[in-house]
Image (cartoon, rainbow, N blue to C red):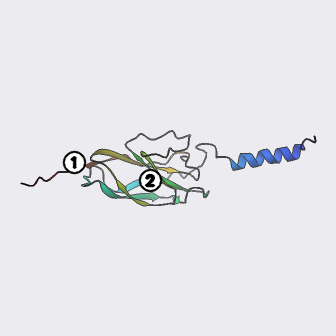
Amino acid sequence: MKLPSKRLAAAALGLALLSGPALAGDTPRPDNAQLYIIWPKDGRAIPGGKLWLRLGLKNFGVAPAGIERANTGHHHVIINAPLPAFDEEIPNDRNHLHFGGGQTEARIQLPPGRHTLQLLMGDHNHVPHDPPLFSERITVIVPPLVSQSKN
């Protein structure tokens, strides 16, 4: 059996490293970038719980997940949860919504109660930038549904 040459083995290792996920938190971003929630405002009551979440960004760009471009990323909305680890891929579940298509607004539905919302930018691999770019956490209130009884 013939063993592969050192050159071929090195090339294969290089390709494997390039095709794998980027090291967590290694995508830089400008220090003057800002991420914020345009709407709703902090403390806002949201009757019925349906809202158009509008996302703001300054000195930074938006690119879909999978597209590696300097000074860009895509939004993740953190609902009722702390920010995730900055050196790992951002989870994708009911508390961590991914907007990998490059969306800057989204229709979301929240149940009655008090909710926190926070934004976190992710790079092309859904990993926070270095340093991480996140918004202030806001609170919104969805009032309980009032049933109307018929007499």
- Tell me the CA gap for discs 2 and 1: 30 Å
Q: Secondary structure at mark 1?
A: loop
Q: Secondary structure at mark 2?
A: strand
Residue drawn at x 45%, y 41% is: 83
Looking at the image, residue 103 sits to the left or right of residue 113; the answer is right
Residue at numbered disc 1: 144
Three-letter amino acid code of the residue under disc 2:
Leu
Residue drawn at x 52%, y 56% is: 100
Quadrant in the picture for the C terminus: bottom left
Residue drawn at x 9%, y 55% is: 150
Q: Estimate how packed mark 1 is, as few (under 14), some (14 to 19) or many (20 or more) residues with alpha carbons within 10 Å.
A: few
Q: Position of residue 65 (x, y in %)?
A: 56, 56
Q: Position of residue 37 (x, y in %)?
A: 38, 54
Residue at numbered disc 2: 35
Three-letter amino acid code of the residue under disc 1:
Pro
Looking at the image, residue 21 sits to the left or right of residue 146; the answer is right
Looking at the image, residue 82 sits to the left or right of residue 85; the answer is left
Residue drawn at x 26%, y 54% is: 46
Q: Position of residue 18 (x, y in %)?
A: 71, 49
Q: Quick one: which residue is furthest to the left in this view?
A: 151
Mark toward the viewer: 2 or 1: 1
Q: Estimate how packed mark 2 is, as few (under 14), some (14 to 19) or many (20 or more) residues with alpha carbons within 10 Å.
A: many
Looking at the image, residue 47 sits to the left or right of residue 28; the answer is left
